[in-house]
Structure formats: C-alpha cells, structure tokens
C-alpha cells in the first residue's frame, strides 16, 4: 500500500492539529479560491436532493447574504422537483436554478460540477461520496461533505488523497459531523481537553433509535425496475450504499469519542452485532456493540440499535481520573461532575446552520476550513467496528485502513446487475 496512506499516529495527530486550527491560521488562496468581498455572489450546487440535502441547501442559502443556489443534481427527477419546490418556498430570492441546471441521472453530479458553481454540497448516499468529492475538489470547488465519507476502506483511502488535494488547493472542505459545530459540545470538549476530568479512562456512547427506512417486501418491486434503481430507492438497507447503521448514523457517537481523545484513532476493536428484526431485503444489521481500545488502554464502548418500540438514547459519557463529563445529544446541556462542577449555560444555535455559517465565512475570508482528515478517520473507525462485528474478529486500525474489500461497484449504469451480498455471519464471514 502507498506509504502516504499508512498514517502513523504522530502524523495523524499533527495533521489533525493543523486541520483543527484552520480558522485561526491565515491562508493565501490561489485566484480561483481567493477571498471574496460580500458583493460577489457565491454560486452553490446541490448534489443529492433528499431530506438532508434539501436541509443543507437551505442552511447554505441562510449562511451568507450574497449566495444563490444555481444548480441541482439527483438520480431521480421527482426527488429533485420536490426539493426545488421546498427551497423556492424557503428562500425564493436566492433560488436561481434554471431548468437547464437541473441535472438528473448517474452522471448528474459531474454536470453540476461543470456548471460554473463555486460551492458543492454533497448529500447523496455515502457510497458515492469518494467519487463525488474527488471530482469536486479536482474542479477547484469548495465542498460541504455529509457524513460518512465512504462505506469501505478503499473509499476512505481515496478520500484521504482528495483531502490532501483540497489542502494544496486551499479549498474549504467542511464535513457533516455537525456536533463539532455545536457551541455546547465545543465548550464541553474544550474543558475535557484542558484536563477538567483528568485522563480519560473509559467512554460510553449510545445511538439507540427507531428503525430507519424499513425495506419494503420484494413483492412491491415493479417487474421493470432494475437492481440499481430498487437499491437506490431504498439505499439505507444496502451496505455498499449506506454502510450499515453503525457507519451511517452511530458514526456521530463514534466522532464524540475521537473528539474526546483529541482525534487519536482507536488501535483496535472487537464487536458484536446482528439482525434481530427480520427483513426481506437488504443486508444490514439492526444492532451493534463495539469495544474500541485506544493507546494507553483507554476503552470506548458504543451501543447502537435501530428498532421500533424500544427505549431510545443518544448520549456520550466520558470517565476520567478527576471526574465525569457527559454529552447528552439533543436531550439536555452537557455537564462535568467531579473536581470540576460545570454545566453549559450558553447559547446553543442550530449546529447544522453553524457549520454552513463558518464554511461560508472561511470562503469569504480566504482562510479555508479543512475537516478532511478527521472526517475520514471517524468514518474508518466506524467501518472498523462494522468489520469486527461482521467477522467476529479483532480488527486493528492498520487492518481496517489497508482492507481490500470493495463494496461499491466500480462501474454502474441502470442495467448493471447489482447482486446483494448475503448477511454477514460472525465467525464465518472473512476479513478481506
């Protein structure tokens, strides 16, 4: 494997530190990405017009007084149309999408990138993220990139290469790990990093929620519908498209753990998981429990479940030698108990909006944000946990990073057969 992709802990921490201080360090952009005054219109393009993409577009339009959405792309015409109508109601003065800039199809993303936009919002199913991100950065676009950034290790390696290209081109690359942009969580983790709970010895995070986008029975599939269209319309249920619930949703809770550890990645993981509620199609688990081990013996425990009519919880608790810190997701304000007693009482604006506010401010100022390394490493930590659960084996960081398992088909068209791999069977499914 290319040595540049085999990131040592020292290299990773150094790179993460640079990425984390991007807003503080002055940068000189080339002419294409130079700082702009507020009178110049920033043209935005949306790739992926589902609920999250429509939300991201609305937040982008609210982030700057002189920004316009000028292009939209999706594989399905009806989804693009619904998103367009919603956004026209939300921000009519900033919607400048002409009919010839509504792109539909598997190559719609490239047409949008080539349409003259300055900023690209990537919100398709994550299996497409590495290809779309590479194309956008190659074209010199600033990017908002939803999480996770890949569904397999080759995709993560591609993203890491693209992240470096974004750095060289001094382009803003903001990730959809939205909690990093929540002021309350920033205050909590700043105090944890300053030693308020001492050395972290253990972490426990949860992502217990209801079933998401259940798979319809095969009998509802029209006879004329191709494998690809069927899977795209129900993308969450297929590992190559969504990555499984651990990678697509619980990755937020994993990101809290890496954030607490100053973006030090776990060294290894063991896990259990399975499918308890039957499904006629798809190939994803509906529950996981992952045990991560970090350098120095710190443990991170993650519980994830996507089942209806069960108790839900989304929180993170961090146990240190001097106290305990807790992040309570959407439920309440973060707090610290122990030698330090603290509860966050400041403002808590919409974190989804804050990430766009800061991205557009960075573009205007010529001081690009690059969240790339940490978004790729958090994604890989989630994939690592999935690998451990699927195989029943202990998976190290280097094993996960160097895995040769390719989930995403190399070439896709509407007629390409896309067979669905069988359910993983721990102890039988092999690590690749």
Image (tube, grey):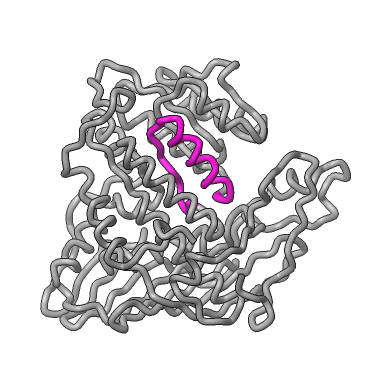
Left or right placement of residue 9 versus residue 417 in this view: left
Farthest residue to the right: give it: 223
Confirm whether the magenta stretch covers residue 163: no
Residue 9 x %, y % = 31, 67
Q: Which residues are magenta?
A: 126-149
- In depth, the one of 105 and 159 nearer the eye is 159
The structure residue drawn at horizontal position 63% and vertical position 59%, both measured from the top left corner, is: 239
Residue 52 x %, y % = 50, 43
The structure residue drawn at horizontal position 28% and vertical position 75%, both measured from the top left corner, is: 318
Query: Where 211 falls versus 36 (above or below)?
Result: below
Farthest residue to the left: give it: 339
- In depth, the one of 135 and 39 nearer the eye is 135
Q: Across the whole image, how many numbered discs are drawn on residues?
A: 0
Residue 39 x %, y % = 26, 16
Q: Quadrant of residue 154?
A: bottom right
Residue 335 x %, y % = 22, 68
């Amino acid at each position: 494997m290319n040595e540049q992709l085999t990131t040592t802990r020292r290299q990773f921490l150094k790179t993460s530190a640079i990425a984390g201080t991007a807003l503080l360090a002055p940068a000189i952009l080339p002419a294409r990405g130079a700082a702009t005054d507020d009178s110049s219109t920033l043209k935005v393009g949306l790739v992926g017009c589902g609920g999250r993409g429509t939300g991201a577009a609305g937040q982008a339009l609210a982030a700057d007084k002189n920004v316009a959405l000028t292009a939209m792309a999706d594989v399905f015409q009806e989804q693009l149309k619904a998103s367009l109508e919603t956004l026209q109601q939300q921000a009519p003065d900033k919607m400048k999408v002409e009919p010839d800039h509504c792109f539909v199809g598997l190559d719609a993303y490239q047409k949008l990138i080539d349409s003259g936009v300055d900023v690209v919002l990537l919100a398709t199913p994550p299996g497409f993220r590495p290809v779309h991100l590479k194309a956008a950065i190659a074209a010199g676009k600033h990017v908002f990139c939803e999480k996770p950034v890949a569904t397999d290790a080759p995709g993560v390696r591609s993203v890491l290469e693209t992240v470096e290209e974004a750095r060289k081109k001094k382009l803003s690359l903001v990730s959809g790990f939205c909690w990093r942009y929540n002021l309350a969580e920033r205050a909590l983790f700043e105090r944890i990093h300053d030693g308020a709970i001492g050395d972290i010895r253990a972490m426990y995070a949860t992502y217990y929620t209801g079933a998401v986008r259940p798979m319809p029975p095969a009998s509802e599939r029209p006879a004329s519908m191709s494998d690809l269209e069927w899977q795209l319309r129900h993308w969450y249920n297929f590992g190559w498209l969504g990555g499984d619930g651990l990678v697509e949703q619980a990755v937020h809770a994993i990101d809290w753990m890496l954030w607490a550890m100053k973006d030090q990645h776990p060294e290894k993981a063991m896990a259990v998981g399975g499918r308890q509620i039957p499904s006629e199609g798809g190939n994803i688990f509906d529950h996981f429990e992952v045990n991560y081990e970090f350098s120095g013996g710190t443990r991170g425990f993650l519980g994830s479940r996507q089942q209806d009519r069960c108790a839900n919880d989304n929180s993170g608790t961090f146990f240190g030698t001097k106290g305990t810190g807790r992040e309570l997701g959407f439920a309440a304000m973060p707090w610290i108990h122990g030698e330090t007693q603290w509860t966050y009482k400041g403002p808590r604006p919409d974190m989804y909006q804050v990430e766009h506010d800061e991205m557009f401010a960075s573009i205007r100022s010529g001081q690009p944000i690059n969240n790339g390394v940490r978004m790729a490493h958090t994604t890989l930590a989630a994939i690592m946990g999935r690998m451990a659960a699927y195989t029943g084996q202990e998976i190290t960081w280097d094993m996960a990073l160097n895995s040769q398992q390719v989930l995403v088909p190399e070439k896709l068209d509407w007629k390409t057969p896309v067979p669905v791999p069988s359910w993983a069977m721990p102890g039988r499914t092999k690590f690749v």
